[in-house]
Amino acid sequence: MSLLKDQTALITLRPFFRFLLPASFFLAVIPVLAQHPLDFAAGKAIFDKNWVFAPASTGASDGLGPLFNARSCNACHPDGDRGANSSALVVHLNDRVYGQQIQKFTRPGVQAEAMIDLNWPESVGAKPLPPVALSLIDLEYGPLTSPALSLRIAPPVHGLGLLESIPESVILLLADAEDADGDGISGRVNRLPDGKLGRFGWKASQVSLFDQIGRALSLDMGLGNPHLPDPYGDCTLLQANCRKTTEGNNADNLEVSQKAFDLLLSYVRKIPAPPQANLTAGERVGQNLFLDTGCGGCHLPKIEFDGQEIHPYTDLLLHDMGPRLADELEEGGAAGNEWRTPPLWGLKPSHGNFLHDGRARNLREAILWHGGEANAARQAFQELNEKEQSDLIDFLSRL
């Protein structure tokens, strides 16, 4: 495609993106659109589109289910952001009968796996809320064979392509599993059973965006794809009824064809990181407090590699976060008390739903939930006066 045609396509697509994306996202993504406008638009269309049950007249969009938690990627990651409790919370498990997730929805004629009962605690003064009480009701396929459960909320997806591009050697240099420097922080990589290094997901259990996206298509929407081609998704062999349904079969004998998968993968890789803001004087004070309290020990302010510098505020490592944040579910090589440092860029504090299960209503609560290796940083934050805490949180809000 000629440069002139590229520019014409970009001008044509601008109104489309202005309605669907925040202005800051649109401005950040213009360089990407200028290079590959049609592929980017096609990838976003796949990210946004609602899948339907097979057989359907819209053959390129059928294959949903038979068990699923969402009809689209955008349902859990609205405009690439962190999900909301109502739509983006899922229950992870590792069960021989129920698979890797409890699915909230099914296609007609298929038994629902269970009802997910979430008992959100009431606020008591300024104290952080206790974790949500999780239970499963009406398990339709019999009792769980592995009772460990973990509630997870969909994380934001901006800047993931940059995180994927960090060389493994750089991540390994950041690791300090034995706390050799004596700073109380002993981040380590999640070395998966096949020997590969994980970097995506709440427990760093996925190696690449190819793995992460393929897993999400399969588990969250029941869509066969180049990574996980089974059209029945998380419907296990012991759930015979749901494996009798008619599933989609588009190009490449997949529900998400290789071409569609490549466009989706390319789109997610190109979703830009949030642009760095110009900080006010108070926010710069907060930035210094962030470093002085030790928060930057895990949430690294910058990572340098291959001649570039990025600011995701993560080290992509597993850390012991203490018993209050622990679950009982191991993932890859990650224990229940270990969590990958989540990136802090693009926090959008007005959305709430912080930490892996959305329990924290605001950033202050999220900080106060930190334990384990983050004990010292949390205590340092608690020793700040009200103005200093506010300045630190204001800084986080601008990332």
Image (spheres, rainbow, N blue to C red):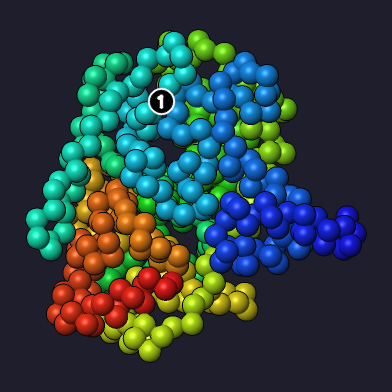
Lateral position of residue 396 relative to residue 68, left or right:
left
Q: Quadrant of the C terminus?
A: bottom left
Q: Nearer the viewer, residue 357 or 123?
A: 123
Lateral position of residue 180 relative to residue 277, left or right:
left
Lateral position of residue 109 relative to residue 54, left or right:
left
Q: Dot 1: within a 10 Å radius of its alpha carbon, few (fewer than 14), some, or many (20 or more) residues?
A: many
Q: Quadrant of the N terminus?
A: bottom right
Q: Nearer the viewer, residue 45 or 311?
A: 45
- Residue 118, quarter of picture: top left
**Residue 55 in view here:** yes
Number of numbered discs on residues: 1
Question: Does residue 277 lie above or below 343 as drawn?
Answer: below
Percent across and percent down for residue 189 are 40, 59
Q: Where is mark 1, residue-wise?
A: 105
* Amino acid type, residue under disc 1 in the picture: Phe
Question: Does residue 229 lie above or below 297 as drawn?
Answer: above
Percent across and percent down for residue 292 are 28, 84
Percent across and percent down for residue 332 are 38, 46
| The furthest residue to the left | 124
Residue at figure coordinates x 44%, y 10% from the top left: 109
- Residue 227, quarter of picture: top right
